[in-house]
Image (tube, rainbow, N blue to C red):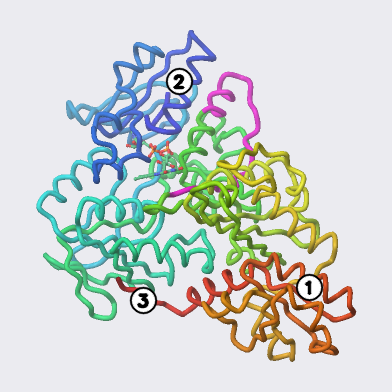
Amino acid sequence: MVIGGVAGGASAAARLRRLDEQAEIVVFERSGHVSFANCGLPYHLSGAIAERRSLLLQSPESLRANFDLDVRVLHEVTGIDRDARVVTGTDLGAGEPFRLHYDALVLSPGASPIRPPIPGAERGLTLRDVEDLDRIGAAVAGARSAVIIGGGFVGLEVAENLCERGLAVTIVELAPQVLAPIDAEMVTYVHDELVAHGIVLRLGHSVTELTATAAVLDDGESIDADLVIFAIGVRPETTLARTAGLEIGPRGGIVVDDTLRTSDPHIWAVGDATEKADSVLGGAALVPLANLANRQGRRAADAIAGRPQPFAAAHSAAVVRVFGLTVAVTGANERRLRAAGHDVLALHTHANSHAGYFPGAETMHLKLLVDPADGRILGAQGVGRDGIDKRIDVISTAMSGGITAPQLADLELAYAPMYGSAKDPVNMLGYLAENVLLDGEPVVAWHELADRQRDGWLVVDVRQPSEVADGAIDGAVNIPLDQLRGRLGELAGRRVVCACAVGQRGHAATRLLRQHGIEAANLIGGYRTLEAATRATVPAVAVTA
Ligand code: FAD
């Protein structure tokens, strides 16, 4: 028996059938639809997914025909008698109660959107299933303005699609940035993209009240809102598990072992409702993502069929499109690592998505987080218009395989000029790690620069004067790289931070100076990282269109 017939639940049921043709498999699903495409829902709001039926991947009839599954939609399970191994619930269509015995039970009830307890909250909508989509679709008709509360993945997707639909969209986010998994200097590009598309950002603010026509912020500002969407996160659906006395973990999700078994030997749980092991920081994590739910569904079925395979700890790899940008992340970010007391080396590149001489190359901003003690990859983030998903997936795969940051230098990656560079940006991150960790090149992070300057270090900007004219580093002197050898005398006895646009010429300059006996260090990621970081770290910045 499976409770919840979408990502994890449908995967478990279909896999179990493939493993066991004799099993009787029943799936209970509370909503009116099974196996629908949650991740595609926002894109029907703009018409990017034109047909609503495209979101309905299977039906009870097709699952019966293809997999001999007994799928019962509009059936809510409300109780589990673990001793008798019986579930009870309500057939919402007929209004009738039901009871059914199980030998093995899989819980995949997902997570429900959080609604803030503010006056007028009943007017706010959430997006989780097809019924929610229909409600939002009805509200959008005739609406001119929308306020999205929460700037996470779902909030940004809904914002983009309502904007494409022609609504005036404001995102209100309590944190000083959208997309919490991304560090501040990386998210600047996302803020720029949202603002460039006319979305108004109210960062560092909360909504305190919804009136009939507006959302009122904590500073008293009233924003027109024909439509309000709550996208402030999700909470694991654990009511059923709690009532049944299953163990709930410190993060509020169902506790499972590495074969997805709960504290009851006859019950497995998968997906958003469960706690996962955090591959980087250790301990339990809530990771409400579809890839994990689907993979867990498969593994739970394996375990029930008597062929358990351990489920690996989660890197929380995720990707989202924000208009023309792709933002992807895996592992932990620098903020979380430092908060956990981790020593971390943060490396930045701003490489071309493919060979610069082939038309259409775009800058891709990549950040790699590394344990300086052993080179272990702790996380990575990417923002750009092309090729970001591939690079973050390569790094995520490297993390699974235990490949260290310097070893990225030796990855053999397919290349042709329209797809990448002969030195792929992932190889380049490996070179950076190798330079620092194996060759011992001193580096300075953007947030350490001011302290270095206060300590008397001189910043030498080795870009060309024309580049410096477009944006200078405070207190830096400009000695272009091609003049550096001839002007070493100007730096005698100085300690020097070498800076350039992205860190590459700074690396060459640092090597050059050190071989001439001048103490030098390279500014990681160069002026581009510094500039993005400086704009991002303004506290509670309110960026307006
Ligand atoms: P779900 O897929 O939510 O399924 C749980 C089902 O259980 C629900 O349909 C619910 O009705 C049913 N249920 C709950 N309780 C009961 C009960 N007592 N009785 C009967 N039925 C019950 N993830 C990504 O990785 N990438 C994305 O791009 C992405 N985009 C998303 C966009 C949106 C708008 C949303 C809402 C989610 C998105 N996700 C995305 C997250 C992804 O959809 C979830 O991680 C995934 O669906 C979780 O699978 P699950 O099986 O745990 O829960």
Q: Helix or strand or loop: what does disc 3 sit on?
A: loop
Location of the C terminus (image quadrant): bottom left
C-beta proximity under 8 Å, tags 3 and 2 = no
Amino acid type for the residue under numbered disc 2: Ala
Estimate the spatial distance between the alpha carbons at disc 3 and disc 2, rounded to whole Å: 48 Å
Q: Give the range drawn in magenta.
A: 298-320
Residue 510: which numbered mark, if any?
1
Mark toward the viewer: 1 or 2: 1
Q: Nearer the viewer, mark 1 or mark 3?
A: 1
N-term mark: 1 or 3: 1
Kindly state the secondary structure of the residue where label 2 is placed: helix
Query: Which amino acid is tagged 3?
Result: Ala
In contact (CB < 8 Å): disc 1 and disc 2: no
Q: Which residue is drawn at 30% across and 20% down?
A: 60
Q: Which callout, 3 or 2, points at the residue further toward the start of the chain?
A: 2
The secondary element bearing badge 1 is classed as helix
Q: Which numbered marker is on residue 463?
A: none
Q: In which quarter of the image is residue 369?
A: bottom right
- Is 149 situated above or below 88? below
Any mark on residue 542, and which? 3
| Left or right placement of residue 485 versus residue 117 in this view | right
Q: Which of 40 and 533 is in front in this view?
A: 533
The image position of residue 196, as x and y in percent, is 34, 64
Question: Which residue: 37% across, 40% down?
Answer: 39
